[in-house]
Image (spheres, grey):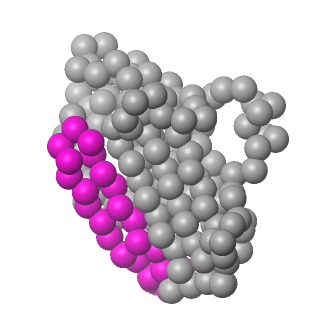
Amino acid sequence: MRIGLILITAALPTLLCPHAALAGDWKAIIAKDMVVVANGKMTMDRYSLCKVKVPGAKKTSVQLRVYAEASESAGISRDFFVSRGQAAQTGIIMFLGAGYAKGTAVSATGALDCHAITAPIGKVDVEVSAYMTGEGVQLAVMDAATGTTAQDVTMWADLFEEK
């Protein structure tokens, strides 16, 4: 699977959707804290197992990891931190879905059926890392199949600037 890593890193920071469409044990999902605060840092570490629902696809499943980190002293609220971490998760799911659905009658939103998992089963296929500071965010996307990593840095001021 070849992923347009540069496109992913460019699109993720601007996504407005604050949550991913993940199925699973909803009681466990809503009860669990998304953010761990320890040693002066906020971290979020989420895993998803997605079944590929596109006939003829070379892969039948994809495992994802989304990791986000920010210093408590960065001036970033916990709510904003969570929303950007979730935007990264939603963005990668939508981007991968569009890649699998391309050239088929399946829509991008229907191409993957994702469920939250507590830990990876073996190695993840795609890993997104977001490192946030008071100035901006560095996003890195790693494709395990190719060993390729792409990263981009975006200033918060550029994202919120009126045009």
Report the number of discs: 0
In the image, 14 versus 64, the foreground residue is: 64
Q: Furthest residue to the front?
A: 39
Q: Could you tell me residue 73's position as x and y percent? A: 66, 84
Tell me if 14 is positioned left or right of 84 in this view.
left
Q: Is residue 98 among the parts visible in the rendering?
A: no
Image-based side of 11 in relation to 30, left or right: left
Q: What x and y, as percent, mark residue 66? A: 49, 50
Residue found 27% across the figure and 46% down from its top: 143
Quarter of image, res 46: top right
Q: Is residue 95 left or right of residue 57?
A: right
Quarter containing the N terminus:
top left
Q: Is residue 6 above or below residue 22?
A: below
Above or below: residue 129 compared with residue 92: below
Above/below status of 22 relative to 156: above
51 within the magenta span:
no
Q: Residue at left 75%, top 50%?
A: 33
User: Percent from the top left, x then y, of residue 80?
Assistant: 66, 68
Identity of the residue furthest to the top in this view: 55
Q: Please state if 103 lies on the left or on the right of 31 as rendered.
A: left
**Quadrant of the rendered image containing residue 125:** top left
The answer to whether residue 6 is seen in the rendering is yes
Residue 53, image x, y percentages: 40, 18
- Residue drawn at x 35%, y 61% as measured from the top left: 140
Magenta run includes residue 140 = yes
Residue at x-position 76% and y-position 44%: 32
Q: Which residues are magenta?
A: 136-163
